[in-house]
Image: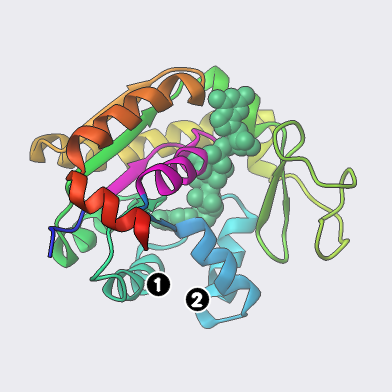
């Protein structure tokens, strides 16, 4: 059997991790594992982790490391026969170390997006607090303004997505992410992409993965 391929995508809120991950999944056949999606599934199912995580997500804060690792590592163990791209995990050094002890990564993609661009994207972000579903008033608006598509309940804006709090939160992200980025740089697997537009970053990500993913593996993944 071919060697499996394991990648991580890092980036601040609004940096385009989800958008690029979906393109990677459809072009290269990797499984897209999103920590935000796992959290939202757990919130919807009202699991113990979901109930706890909701209180942090509502505030725009990071969910504690022990909750995240307890949630993510068993999911990865279920994926031992698949190649995957992990989106949104790890976010802290403690999470990166836990991931390190569970598996070996081939590539880490890091999105470096200017602060002004992130501010512009996030200030239009609204969420449905009960489910954690996220909307952007320009790029993925709800069908009816201000209302969740599925439940019909009102959307709210994170206190932290309001302009006053946003800069502090994005700086906090940078501080927490720096040791994670340093760790992967030291391992020689970090690839950083800087631009204001996902469409301009994508061709570089695509050619990196074309070079790194063995051809027989890419064919096999696409066939499944
Ligand atoms: P998530 O779900 O991981 P965030 O906040 O990290 O959420 P988000 O908002 O989902 O990230 P993203 O995935 O980086 O952003 O980016 P995206 O969704 O692709 O794009 C953001 C928006 O910009 C979209 O509307 C998109 O259409 C638009 N866009 C993309 N590219 C472009 C472009 O080129 N131009 C323009 N104009 N627009 C574009 O996590 C949710 C919460 O869960 C918790 C945290 O509380 C987190 O806030 N959490 C964790 N906590 C602790 N540890 C972890 N590991 C955690 N993981 C999740």
Q: Which residue is mark 2?
A: 49
Choose between 183 and 205: the one closer to the eye.
205
Number of numbered markers: 2
Q: Are marks 1 and 2 in contact (CB under 8 Å)?
A: yes
Residue range highlighted in magenta: 7-28
Q: CA distance from mark 1 to mark 2?
A: 7 Å
Q: Does the magenta portion include 137? A: no
For marks 1 and 2, give the one nearer the viewer. 1
Crowding at dot 2, Cα within 10 Å, few <14 / some 14-19 / many 20+, comes out as some
Residue at 35%, 69% (x, y): give it. 66
Q: Does the magenta portion include 14? A: yes
Q: Secondary structure at mark 1?
A: helix
Q: Is residue 127 visible?
A: yes
Residue at 62%, 53% (x, y): give it. 59
Choose between 9 and 166: the one closer to the eye.
9
Q: Secondary structure at mark 2?
A: helix
Q: Quadrant of the N terminus?
A: bottom left
Crowding at dot 1, Cα within 10 Å, few <14 / some 14-19 / many 20+, comes out as some
Q: Can you tell me whether the CB of the residue at mark 1 lies under 8 Å from the nearest atom of ligand 1?
A: no
Above or below — where is 36 with respect to 52? above
Residue 80 location, quadrant:
bottom left
Residue at 34%, 31% (x, y): give it. 206
Q: Is residue 13 visible?
A: no
Picture coordinates of residue 34 (x, y %)? 45, 56
Q: Which residue is mark 1?
A: 71
């Amino acid at each position: 059997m071919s060697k499996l391929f394991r990648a991580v995508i890092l980036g601040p809120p609004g940096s385009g991790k989800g958008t690029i991950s979906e393109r990677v999944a459809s072009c290269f056949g990797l499984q897209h594992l999103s920590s935000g999606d796992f959290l939202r599934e757990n919130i919807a199912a009202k699991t113990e982790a979901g109930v706890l995580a909701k209180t942090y997500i509502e505030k725009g804060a990071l969910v504690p490391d022990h909750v995240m690792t307890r949630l993510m590592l068993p999911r990865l163990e279920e994926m031992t026969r698949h190649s995957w791209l992990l989106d949104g995990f790890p976010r802290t050094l403690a999470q990166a170390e836990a991931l390190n002890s569970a598996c070996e990564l081939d590539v880490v993609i890091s999105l470096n997006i200017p602060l002004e661009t992130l501010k512009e994207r996030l200030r239009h972000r609204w969420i449905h607090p009960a489910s954690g579903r996220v909307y952007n008033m320009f790029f993925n608006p709800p069908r009816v303004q201000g209302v969740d598509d599925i439940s019909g309940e009102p959307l709210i804006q994170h206190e932290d997505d309001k302009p006053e709090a946003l800069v502090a939160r994005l700086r906090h992200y940078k501080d927490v992410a720096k040791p994670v980025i340093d760790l992967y740089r030291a391992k020689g697997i970090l690839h950083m992409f800087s631009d204001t537009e996902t469409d301009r970053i994508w061709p570089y990500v695509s050619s990196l993965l074309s070079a790194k993913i063995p051809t027989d593996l890419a064919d096999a993944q696409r066939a499944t």
